[in-house]
Amino acid sequence: MPTIRTSDEFDRIGQVGEGTYGSVYKAKDRLTSELVAMKKIRLTHEKEGFPITAIREIKLLRDMDHENVVKLKEVVSTKETTHNKGKGSIYIVFEFMDHDLMGLMDTAKMDFKVEQIKCFTKQLLAGLHYCHKRGIMHRDIKGSNLLINNAGILKLGDFGLSRSFNEKDIQYRYTNRVVTLWYRPPELLLGAVVYSEKIDMWGVGCIMAELLIQRPLFPGKNEKDQMEKVFAICGTPNETVWPGCSNLPYFNMVQGKEALPDRLQHHLSKHQGKVSTAASDLLCKLLHMDPTKRMSAGDALDHDWFWTDPMPCDPSCLPRYPSSHEFVTKKRRQEGKEMPGAQPGGQPDAKRHQPAHNNHSNSKGAPPAARPSEAGKGGDRHGGKGHAGHERAPANGSWRPR
């Protein structure tokens, strides 16, 4: 039986992420001189043993092999000492990725060409297609969980909130506490616990739109504001456009309010420089209010947008940037704001990075006080691969993702 290596066999270079269960470090393997990412899993305060999110991430990733999914290399531990009394740290070791999309967007100041955006989006869809075909939903699609190396390859990372699903058991109940606020689909905002891999596709639409219009599409301050921002652009849900939506737990928050029309296409038409007719059509299909009508990853890869000029560029043609991770660029921005004479500006530090805290508390049938985000399986027709991102903090430490 192979022995587990210890963390002493790696040289830490610097921190590239921060999470509930520990930190993510760039490191070098002393044995191979290879750069890796090490996600530290703290066990000191874990009452129930090894965190379920870490177990799930290891279990799912060890069986996946795809160009657009981050590669799990091994699990290592700290040496047992009299000080830690056997309660040291476990590290999940991944291939190192030079950037995450959130950090890269900050570094590049959101200025990507359409062919580059097509390249990123196509790889994201390829990774998700592979996951969904294998019966895994990611459940936390956002920029900081999309990892990119200097060869231009984008990979899905941070599978801590992912879980397997069974298409035959369509009434299975999952936790509602998934997906970071800005990328959370309407079914989750309305309290659904029965949902499918289509929650990931809403996130793809939000990411694609953000890259094209150079700003977040739905930057809500809290869950109530998030609902209002989504419905203001995509229309108020009703039984005509979304059969069954009136049965969702928080639909009463929609009732009695002015019924807003679907204005998504109109909203996108304001950005005709980058949002072509084909791009607008794809976004409308990814951001469909009714999840059963939302386009799948496989179908999206065959959409006309990827087959019209400008064609998606080859990943190797993407420009080179200094290593850019959200944790580092955000810290750099904060340090800049604290410097004398610093000018305000840059991308907002908002709920794209953090779990949302619920502000429905004064409403009848309101959701729980806070909820973090979470993450999912796919086919082999469309290529794709990814580095581990950040964990989200549980609202009170008591829940475990299901």
Image (cartoon, rainbow, N blue to C red):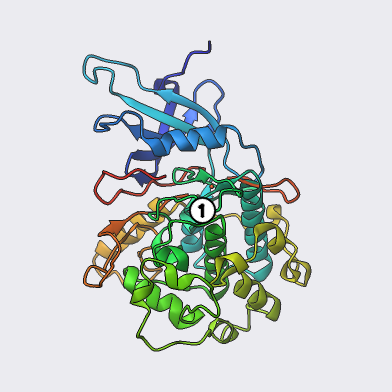
In the image, 81 versus 11, the foreground residue is 81
Element on which disc 1 rests: loop
Q: Quadrant of residue 52?
A: top left
Q: Residue at x 40, y 51 (%)?
A: 175
Q: Is residue 175 visible?
A: yes
Counting from the top left corner in percent of width and height, residue 109 is at: 49, 67
Q: Residue at x 66, y 41 (%)?
A: 66
In the image, 319 versus 256, the foreground residue is 256
**Label 1 neighbour load within 10 Å: few <14, some 14-19, many 20+:** few
Counting from the top left corner in percent of width and height, residue 115 is at: 69, 67
Q: Quadrant of residue 399?
A: top left
- Quadrant containing the C terminus is top left
- The residue furthest top is 1
Q: Residue at x 57, y 61 (%)?
A: 201
Residue receiving disc 1? 171
Q: Is residue 37 visible?
A: no
Up-down relation of residue 300 to residue 402 (above or below): below
Left or right position of 109 against 382: left
Q: Residue at x 39, y 51 (%)?
A: 327
In the image, 66 versus 340, the foreground residue is 66
Up-down relation of residue 163 to residue 8 (above or below): below
How many labels sit on residues? 1
Three-letter code for the amino acid on which mark 1 is drawn: Gln
Counting from the top left corner in percent of width and height, residue 343 is at: 31, 72
Up-down relation of residue 357 to residue 100 (above or below): below
Counting from the top left corner in percent of width and height, residue 117 is at: 63, 65
In the image, 35 versus 155, the foreground residue is 155
